[in-house]
Amino acid sequence: MRRNLIFLCIPIICLLTAGLSSAFAETPARPPSGQPASLSLQEAIHASITSNPMLRAADSRRGASGDRLTQARSGMLPQVYFTQSFQRTTNPMWVLGTKLNQGVMTAGDFAPNLLNDPEAIDNFNSRFWFLWPLLDGPTIYGWKQADLGETASGAAFDRTRQETIARTVEAYADLLSARHQIIVIDQTIDTATAHLKMIQKRFENGMVVKSDVLRAKVHLAELEQNRAIARSSAAVARASLNTVMGAPTSQDVSLTTQLSKIKEPLPELPELITTAVSRRPDLKQMEAQVRIAASEMDKARAGHWPTLNLNGGYEFNSEEFTDDTNENYTIGADLTVNLFSGGRITGQAREALNKLSEAKSQKQALFQQIRLETEKAYYDLLSADLRITASELAVQNADETLRIVTNRYDTGLLNVVSLLDAELALYRCNTSYYTSLQDHVKARVHLALALGTLDENFR
C-alpha cells in the first residue's frame, strides 16, 4: 500500500512542479506589429532595442548564461533519483539475493537442489537514491566560472545594446541627410530650370550664343543625375533604418526629429579616456574573461584534491507489485584521491596558464582600442563642429553670390559660366552643410559609444 501511495504522489508532484514552472516563466516580449507613419529618433531607438534580432539574440545568450549558473550550482547540491525496475531470473546467486531482499527466505531454500537449480523468481524493485558531492574542487571552481560567465554575458548584452542604439542613430541621421540632399537638389534644379528659360530667352533675342543654352542644359542634366543618385541613397538609408529596427525594409517612415547641432561643453580628452575605461561594457566583459581564465588554472589544479561524496538509497522489493514489500536502506560515503593522472592535470594547468596569458593580452589590446576610438570620436566631433560653422557662413555667401551673379548675367555683365558656377557653388555649400550636421550627430553617437555611456536617451 505504501508503494501505491508513492506512485500516486509522484505524478501529482511532477504536475505541480511543471505548473509552477509555467506560472513563473517569463512571457517573451512580442515585437511591435508595425511602426507608425511618423517616427522620431526616440521612437526609432525604442523600436530597435525592442525588436532588433541581434539584440534579442544577445538577450537569449544572457539568459543561457544564467541557466548555466543554475546548472553549475546544482553540482554541489544533493541529486535525488527514483528508479522502478522489474527482473525475472533463474541465476542461483541472484535468486538467493532476491529472496533475501524480499524477506521471503526460508530454511527449505537452502536445500542443495534448490540452491543449484532454483525456480524462476520475479522481483519488483522501487528505489529512491541520492548522491551528494560534499567536496569536489572542479565543481566548486566551475560554479565560480559560471558566475563570472553570467557577468560577462550581461556586459556583452549591454555592449550589443549600445551598438544597436548607435546603428539606429547613424541610420536615422543618414536618412535625414539623404532626404535633405533631395530637397537641396530639387531647389537647385528649380533654379537651374528658371535660369535655362532666361538663357533661352536671351538666345532668342540674339544676346547670347547657342553654346550658352547647351551648357545650361548639360548642367541641368547633371543635376538630374545627382537627384537620381540622392533618391537611391535615401532608399538605401530607409532600408538600413528599418533593418536595425527589425521592420520590413520597404516600410516608409516620416522622420520628425531634425538634424541639429547640440551645443554642450565637451570635457578634455584625458577625462573622456578615463570615463571610457571605467564605463565600457566590453572591457568589463574582458575583465570577467580574464578572471575566468585565472579560475580555470585553479580548477585544473583542483584535480589533485580529494573528492568526497555522500550516497544512499531506500528501496522496496516484492515478487508481486501489489504485495506488501520488504524495505531496506543504504547510506555511505566515498573518498577518492587522484594519485597519478599521467600528466593530464599538469597539462590542463599549463593550458589554462597560456589561455590566461592570451586573455590578458586581449584585454590590453582592447584597452588600446578604447583609447583610439575615444580619441578618433573626439577629434571627429571637433572637426564636424568647425565644419558646421564654416558651412553655415558659406551657404549665406553662396546664396548672396548667386543673387548678384544672376542680376549681372541678366544685364549682360557676366557670362553663363559664372552663372552656372554660382549655382553649383550654392548646391555644394548646402550639401556640405547637411553633411556636416550628419557627421556631427554621428561623431557624437560614436563618442558616446566609445565612452560606454550611450543609452536610449541619446538626443
Image: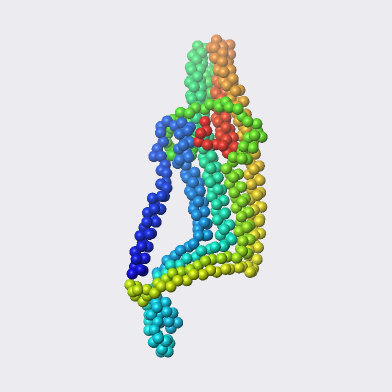
Image location (x, y in percent) of residue 195:
51, 17
Task: Examine the rendered structure and indicate whether residue 154 appears above or below residue 348.
Answer: above
Q: Residue at x 52, y 33 (%)?
A: 458
* Left or right, residue 184 beside residue 299: left
Q: Residue at x 59, y 61 (%)?
A: 137
At x 64% / y 37%, what residue is drawn?
274
- Please tell me in which quadrant of the rendered image residue 127 appears: bottom left
177 vs 299, left or right, is: left
Q: Residue at x 51, y 33 (%)?
A: 457
273 or 36: nearer the eye? 273
Q: Is residue 365 visible?
A: yes
Note whether 59 is above or below 320 in the view shown. above
Q: Disc count in the image?
A: 0
Q: Nearer the viewer, residue 411 or 456?
A: 456
Q: State the image coordinates of residue 269 (x, y, percent, origin top left).
A: 65, 33
Question: In this picture, is 419 found above or below 132?
Answer: above
Q: Nearer the viewer, residue 334 or 117?
A: 334
